[in-house]
Image (tube, helix red, strand yellow):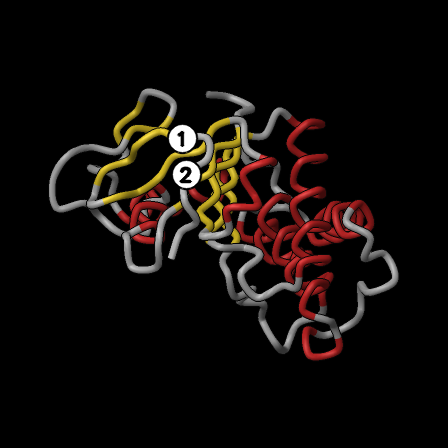
Amino acid sequence: AEGEWVGILGPSGSGKSTLLHIAAGLDRPDRGDVRFAGRSIVGLDRTEMARLRRETLGFVFQFHHLMPDLSALDNVVLPLLLQGYPLERAREEASRMLEMLGLGERLDHFPDRLSGGEQQRVALARALVHRPALLLADEPTGNLDAGNARQFLELVARIRSERSLTVVMVTHNMEHRTFFDRALFLREGLLVPDVEGASPIP
């Protein structure tokens, strides 16, 4: 639902990332359908799918995938330029987004001069700068320590509240359930509702 934060949990290898990639149109399903806002996306060609992702989806991966030769600011500017923003406006929007995430003093830093937590916040800024309706997050805290992981999730929670952002997040960390409105487990190829007191995921 609009504004909902759904967590998808399951053991490694259960297909969580594949499910998220299919939802984003990065992979195609062998059968069945994928619908976004009531519209099937399975039949979209590459150009149409790329446009849908640019305009309405944000994606954060476990590994930040920042461009190493671009500053934090330019990494966040890039998706806006692809949407046709004038450079000056793109830089203003990107700066504002990075400042919102506590990186106002890191705009000109390259990824190798940022901590792991800072790099992932740059990746989050890049995913959200174009104000997508849906954020898909694939193990976004998997490489962060507990403190940085919590800070990252709290930032997502704040932005979600401010923007009515819908979030679907894949994780194997059971402790993250407290942030979700609803949690689902991926077990043997099926999504099943979270059950309070379920045993930890191996």
- Quarter of the image for residue 191 reads top left
User: Which label sits on residue 179?
Assistant: none
Percent of width and height locating residue 98: 76, 52
What amino acid type is highlighted by mark number 2?
Answer: Ala
Give the residue displayed 28% in from the left and 52% down from the top: 15
Q: Residue at image x 45%, y 52%?
A: 172
Secondary structure found at label 2: loop
The dot on residue 195 is 1
Instruction: Residue at the far left: name it.
Output: 31
Helix, strand or loop under label 1: loop
- Write down the residue under mark 2: 198
Q: Residue, x 55% and y 33% (percent of image)? A: 180
24 or 62, which lies in front? 62
| Residue 36 vertical placement versus 29 (above, below) | above
Q: Do the residues labelled 1 and 2 touch (CB within 8 Å)?
A: yes
Q: In the image, is 161 to the left or to the right of 20?
A: right
Q: Nearer the viewer, residue 177 or 57?
A: 177
If the image is split into quadrants, where does the C terminus sit?
bottom left
Q: Is residue 131 above or below residue 18?
A: above
Name the spot of residue 31 as percent of width and height, x first.
11, 40
In the rendered image of this protein, does residue 181 appear above or below residue 158? above
Question: Tag 1: residue type?
Answer: Val
Q: Residue at x 57, y 66 (%)?
A: 143
Q: How far apart are marks 1 and 2 (CA)?
A: 6 Å
Q: In this view, does 127 lie to the left or right of 8?
A: right
Q: Where is residue 138 in the image (x, y as percent from the top left)?
A: 46, 52
Image coords of residue 88 (percent x, y): 76, 51
Q: Badge 2, how many Cα within 10 Å: few under 14, some, many 20+? A: few
